[in-house]
Amino acid sequence: MLTVENLSFRYGRHLSPVLKNVCLSLEDGEIGILLGKNGSGKTTLFQNLLGISRPQGGTLLFDGRDMKKMSRKERAGKVAYVPQHIQFGALSVYNSVLMGRIACFGLRAGEEDCRVTEKILADMKLETYASRNVEELSGGERQKAAIARALAQEPRLLIFDEPTGNLDIANQQLIMEEARKIAKEKNIGILCSLHDLNQALYFGDRFFFLKDGTIKYSGTGDIFSAEIIKDIFDIDVHIIEAENRKIILGGKINED
Protein backbone atom coordinates (compact mmCIF):
# COMPACT_ATOMS: atom_id res chain seq x y z
CA MET A 1 0.00 0.00 0.00
CA LEU A 2 1.21 3.51 -0.87
CA THR A 3 0.78 6.32 1.65
CA VAL A 4 1.82 9.93 1.02
CA GLU A 5 1.51 12.30 3.96
CA ASN A 6 2.09 16.07 3.91
CA LEU A 7 4.56 15.84 1.03
CA SER A 8 6.21 19.13 0.10
CA PHE A 9 8.71 19.86 -2.65
CA ARG A 10 10.40 22.88 -4.24
CA TYR A 11 13.04 22.95 -6.98
CA GLY A 12 15.17 25.61 -5.24
CA ARG A 13 15.49 26.96 -1.73
CA HIS A 14 14.20 30.39 -2.73
CA LEU A 15 11.51 29.18 -5.15
CA SER A 16 7.84 28.68 -4.37
CA PRO A 17 6.85 25.10 -3.49
CA VAL A 18 5.55 22.96 -6.34
CA LEU A 19 3.95 20.45 -3.97
CA LYS A 20 2.37 21.54 -0.68
CA ASN A 21 1.24 19.07 1.99
CA VAL A 22 0.13 16.43 -0.53
CA CYS A 23 -1.71 13.49 1.04
CA LEU A 24 -2.98 10.37 -0.72
CA SER A 25 -3.23 6.63 -0.22
CA LEU A 26 -3.62 3.76 -2.65
CA GLU A 27 -4.31 0.10 -1.90
CA ASP A 28 -2.90 -2.89 -3.78
CA GLY A 29 -5.02 -3.59 -6.86
CA GLU A 30 -6.50 -0.08 -6.96
CA ILE A 31 -6.24 2.35 -9.86
CA GLY A 32 -5.73 5.90 -8.64
CA ILE A 33 -6.14 8.78 -11.09
CA LEU A 34 -4.40 12.14 -10.72
CA LEU A 35 -6.40 14.96 -12.27
CA GLY A 36 -5.43 18.58 -12.71
CA LYS A 37 -4.28 21.24 -15.13
CA ASN A 38 -0.79 21.16 -16.59
CA GLY A 39 1.54 22.66 -14.01
CA SER A 40 -0.53 21.50 -11.05
CA GLY A 41 2.26 19.18 -9.84
CA LYS A 42 1.36 15.75 -11.24
CA THR A 43 4.71 14.97 -12.88
CA THR A 44 6.62 16.40 -9.91
CA LEU A 45 4.70 14.08 -7.59
CA PHE A 46 5.65 11.13 -9.79
CA GLN A 47 9.31 12.20 -9.69
CA ASN A 48 9.20 12.22 -5.89
CA LEU A 49 7.67 8.74 -5.79
CA LEU A 50 10.30 7.44 -8.22
CA GLY A 51 13.21 8.94 -6.30
CA ILE A 52 14.16 11.28 -9.15
CA SER A 53 13.45 14.22 -6.85
CA ARG A 54 13.68 14.26 -3.07
CA PRO A 55 10.93 15.94 -1.03
CA GLN A 56 11.78 18.63 1.51
CA GLY A 57 9.01 17.57 3.84
CA GLY A 58 6.47 14.87 4.57
CA THR A 59 6.58 11.09 4.29
CA LEU A 60 6.44 8.53 1.48
CA LEU A 61 5.54 5.09 2.75
CA PHE A 62 5.19 1.78 0.93
CA ASP A 63 3.83 -1.04 3.10
CA GLY A 64 4.79 1.14 6.04
CA ARG A 65 8.43 1.54 4.94
CA ASP A 66 10.04 4.91 4.29
CA MET A 67 10.65 5.10 0.52
CA LYS A 68 13.23 7.87 0.99
CA LYS A 69 15.49 5.35 2.76
CA MET A 70 15.20 2.68 0.06
CA SER A 71 18.11 2.05 -2.28
CA ARG A 72 17.59 2.63 -6.00
CA LYS A 73 17.50 -1.15 -6.57
CA GLU A 74 15.00 -1.72 -3.77
CA ARG A 75 12.71 1.04 -5.00
CA ALA A 76 12.92 -0.34 -8.58
CA GLY A 77 11.66 -3.65 -7.19
CA LYS A 78 8.55 -1.94 -5.87
CA VAL A 79 7.76 0.92 -8.27
CA ALA A 80 7.86 0.92 -12.09
CA TYR A 81 7.26 3.85 -14.42
CA VAL A 82 5.72 4.18 -17.87
CA PRO A 83 6.40 7.72 -19.13
CA GLN A 84 4.31 9.67 -21.60
CA HIS A 85 7.12 9.80 -24.16
CA ILE A 86 8.69 6.36 -24.48
CA GLN A 87 12.30 5.89 -25.59
CA PHE A 88 13.43 2.38 -26.52
CA GLY A 89 16.30 2.74 -28.96
CA ALA A 90 16.97 0.18 -31.68
CA LEU A 91 16.01 -2.86 -29.61
CA SER A 92 13.76 -5.81 -30.25
CA VAL A 93 10.58 -6.08 -28.21
CA TYR A 94 12.12 -9.03 -26.35
CA ASN A 95 15.28 -7.15 -25.37
CA SER A 96 13.29 -4.03 -24.50
CA VAL A 97 11.18 -5.99 -22.03
CA LEU A 98 14.24 -7.84 -20.73
CA MET A 99 15.84 -4.46 -19.93
CA GLY A 100 13.15 -4.04 -17.30
CA ARG A 101 15.04 -6.73 -15.35
CA ILE A 102 18.33 -4.83 -15.31
CA ALA A 103 17.98 -3.92 -11.64
CA CYS A 104 17.81 -7.65 -10.93
CA PHE A 105 20.63 -8.98 -13.09
CA GLY A 106 23.17 -6.18 -13.49
CA LEU A 107 25.37 -6.92 -16.52
CA ARG A 108 24.03 -10.27 -17.73
CA ALA A 109 20.53 -11.75 -17.71
CA GLY A 110 20.04 -15.17 -16.15
CA GLU A 111 17.53 -17.96 -16.78
CA GLU A 112 15.02 -16.48 -14.34
CA ASP A 113 15.16 -13.09 -16.09
CA CYS A 114 14.48 -14.76 -19.46
CA ARG A 115 11.64 -16.81 -17.97
CA VAL A 116 9.98 -13.70 -16.50
CA THR A 117 10.38 -11.84 -19.82
CA GLU A 118 8.85 -14.68 -21.84
CA LYS A 119 5.89 -14.98 -19.47
CA ILE A 120 5.17 -11.25 -19.62
CA LEU A 121 5.34 -11.28 -23.42
CA ALA A 122 2.82 -14.13 -23.39
CA ASP A 123 0.56 -12.40 -20.85
CA MET A 124 0.58 -9.19 -22.91
CA LYS A 125 0.10 -11.13 -26.17
CA LEU A 126 3.36 -9.76 -27.56
CA GLU A 127 5.08 -13.05 -28.48
CA THR A 128 4.60 -12.53 -32.20
CA TYR A 129 6.35 -9.14 -31.90
CA ALA A 130 9.28 -10.41 -29.81
CA SER A 131 11.90 -10.17 -32.57
CA ARG A 132 10.62 -6.92 -34.09
CA ASN A 133 12.24 -3.54 -33.54
CA VAL A 134 10.08 -1.59 -31.09
CA GLU A 135 10.36 1.53 -33.22
CA GLU A 136 8.51 -0.29 -36.03
CA LEU A 137 5.41 -0.89 -33.91
CA SER A 138 2.23 1.15 -33.79
CA GLY A 139 1.65 3.58 -30.93
CA GLY A 140 -0.57 1.15 -29.05
CA GLU A 141 1.86 -1.74 -29.52
CA ARG A 142 4.77 0.40 -28.28
CA GLN A 143 2.75 1.37 -25.24
CA LYS A 144 2.03 -2.30 -24.54
CA ALA A 145 5.77 -3.02 -24.85
CA ALA A 146 6.47 -0.19 -22.37
CA ILE A 147 3.98 -1.67 -19.90
CA ALA A 148 5.55 -5.10 -20.39
CA ARG A 149 9.01 -3.64 -19.68
CA ALA A 150 7.69 -2.05 -16.49
CA LEU A 151 6.07 -5.34 -15.42
CA ALA A 152 9.40 -7.13 -15.92
CA GLN A 153 10.56 -5.29 -12.80
CA GLU A 154 7.86 -7.26 -10.94
CA PRO A 155 6.70 -4.07 -9.19
CA ARG A 156 3.96 -3.57 -6.63
CA LEU A 157 3.09 -0.11 -7.98
CA LEU A 158 2.92 1.10 -11.59
CA ILE A 159 3.06 4.81 -12.36
CA PHE A 160 1.63 5.98 -15.70
CA ASP A 161 2.16 9.55 -16.90
CA GLU A 162 -0.57 10.27 -19.49
CA PRO A 163 -0.52 6.72 -20.96
CA THR A 164 -3.12 7.49 -23.63
CA GLY A 165 -2.05 11.00 -24.62
CA ASN A 166 -0.61 10.11 -28.04
CA LEU A 167 -2.94 7.24 -28.96
CA ASP A 168 -6.08 6.97 -31.05
CA ILE A 169 -9.38 6.06 -29.40
CA ALA A 170 -9.07 2.32 -30.05
CA ASN A 171 -5.57 2.13 -28.58
CA GLN A 172 -6.58 4.32 -25.63
CA GLN A 173 -9.26 1.77 -24.81
CA LEU A 174 -6.82 -1.11 -25.31
CA ILE A 175 -4.18 0.34 -22.97
CA MET A 176 -6.59 1.29 -20.20
CA GLU A 177 -8.33 -2.10 -20.34
CA GLU A 178 -4.91 -3.75 -20.10
CA ALA A 179 -4.01 -1.56 -17.13
CA ARG A 180 -7.19 -2.50 -15.29
CA LYS A 181 -6.62 -6.20 -16.01
CA ILE A 182 -3.06 -5.96 -14.66
CA ALA A 183 -4.18 -4.17 -11.49
CA LYS A 184 -6.88 -6.68 -10.65
CA GLU A 185 -5.18 -9.93 -11.73
CA LYS A 186 -1.72 -9.15 -10.35
CA ASN A 187 -2.94 -7.07 -7.38
CA ILE A 188 -0.69 -4.18 -8.46
CA GLY A 189 -1.55 -0.61 -7.54
CA ILE A 190 -1.61 1.85 -10.44
CA LEU A 191 -1.24 5.62 -10.11
CA CYS A 192 -2.02 7.36 -13.37
CA SER A 193 -2.43 10.91 -14.67
CA LEU A 194 -5.16 11.55 -17.23
CA HIS A 195 -6.80 14.57 -18.85
CA ASP A 196 -9.93 12.82 -20.15
CA LEU A 197 -12.42 13.01 -17.28
CA ASN A 198 -14.81 10.41 -18.70
CA GLN A 199 -11.95 7.99 -19.31
CA ALA A 200 -10.79 8.58 -15.74
CA LEU A 201 -14.27 7.91 -14.34
CA TYR A 202 -14.59 4.70 -16.33
CA PHE A 203 -11.26 3.16 -15.33
CA GLY A 204 -10.35 4.66 -11.95
CA ASP A 205 -11.13 3.49 -8.42
CA ARG A 206 -9.86 6.53 -6.53
CA PHE A 207 -9.40 10.09 -7.73
CA PHE A 208 -7.06 12.87 -6.62
CA PHE A 209 -7.70 16.41 -7.86
CA LEU A 210 -4.54 18.53 -7.82
CA LYS A 211 -4.63 22.32 -7.79
CA ASP A 212 -1.72 24.67 -7.09
CA GLY A 213 0.46 21.84 -5.82
CA THR A 214 -1.96 20.29 -3.36
CA ILE A 215 -4.64 17.62 -3.51
CA LYS A 216 -7.76 19.68 -2.97
CA TYR A 217 -10.30 16.87 -3.39
CA SER A 218 -10.06 13.08 -3.27
CA GLY A 219 -12.38 10.11 -3.15
CA THR A 220 -14.23 7.58 -5.28
CA GLY A 221 -16.23 8.38 -8.41
CA ASP A 222 -19.00 9.82 -6.25
CA ILE A 223 -16.82 12.88 -5.65
CA PHE A 224 -17.15 14.13 -9.24
CA SER A 225 -19.33 17.21 -9.44
CA ALA A 226 -19.70 20.18 -11.76
CA GLU A 227 -18.54 22.45 -8.93
CA ILE A 228 -15.29 20.55 -8.33
CA ILE A 229 -14.51 20.34 -12.04
CA LYS A 230 -15.13 24.08 -12.36
CA ASP A 231 -12.79 24.76 -9.44
CA ILE A 232 -9.98 22.51 -10.72
CA PHE A 233 -10.17 23.08 -14.48
CA ASP A 234 -12.09 26.35 -14.82
CA ILE A 235 -14.63 24.82 -17.21
CA ASP A 236 -18.39 24.51 -17.01
CA VAL A 237 -19.73 20.98 -17.36
CA HIS A 238 -22.99 19.13 -17.00
CA ILE A 239 -23.01 15.65 -15.44
CA ILE A 240 -25.64 13.10 -16.40
CA GLU A 241 -26.14 9.44 -15.49
CA ALA A 242 -26.67 6.68 -18.04
CA GLU A 243 -26.59 2.94 -17.36
CA ASN A 244 -25.53 3.66 -13.76
CA ARG A 245 -22.50 5.65 -14.94
CA LYS A 246 -21.69 9.33 -14.69
CA ILE A 247 -21.00 11.04 -18.00
CA ILE A 248 -19.44 14.49 -18.11
CA LEU A 249 -20.62 16.84 -20.82
CA GLY A 250 -19.09 20.23 -21.32
CA GLY A 251 -16.27 22.45 -22.47
CA LYS A 252 -12.67 21.68 -23.22
CA ILE A 253 -10.15 21.81 -20.38
CA ASN A 254 -8.19 25.06 -20.40
CA GLU A 255 -4.51 24.03 -20.21
CA ASP A 256 -2.90 27.39 -19.39
Image (cartoon, helix red, strand yellow):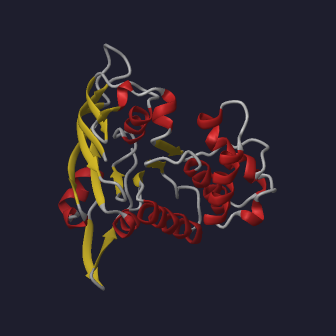
Q: Is residue 234 visible?
A: no
The location of residue 13, given as percent across then percent down, is: 32, 13
For the residue pair 72 and 92, the one nearer the viewer reads as 72
The vertical placement of 16 against 2, above or below, is: above
The location of residue 220, given as percent across then percent down, is: 23, 62
Q: Residue at x 71, y 30 (%)?
A: 107
- Farthest residue, direction bottom: 243
For the residue pair 141 and 151, the one nearer the viewer reads as 151
Q: Residue at x 20, y 62 (%)?
A: 223
Q: Residue at x 28, y 45 (%)?
A: 210
The vertical placement of 185 against 114, above or below, is: below
- Farthest residue, direction front: 111
The location of residue 226, given as percent across then percent down, is: 21, 64
For the residue pair 196 and 206, the one nearer the viewer reads as 206
Corner quadrant of residue 168: bottom right
The vertical placement of 110 against 202, above or below, is: above
Whether residue 79 sits left or right of residue 140 in the image: it is left
Q: Is residue 136 visible?
A: yes
Whether residue 218 sits left or right of residue 111 in the image: it is left
The vertical placement of 30 against 64, above or below, is: below
Quarter of the picture containing the C terminus is top left
Numbered label tally: 0
Whether residue 101 sits left or right of residue 230 in the image: it is right
Whether residue 142 sits left or right of residue 216 in the image: it is right
The location of residue 133, given as percent across then percent down, is: 80, 52
Q: Residue at x 77, y 66 (%)?
A: 128
For the residue pair 100 and 11, the one nearer the viewer reads as 100
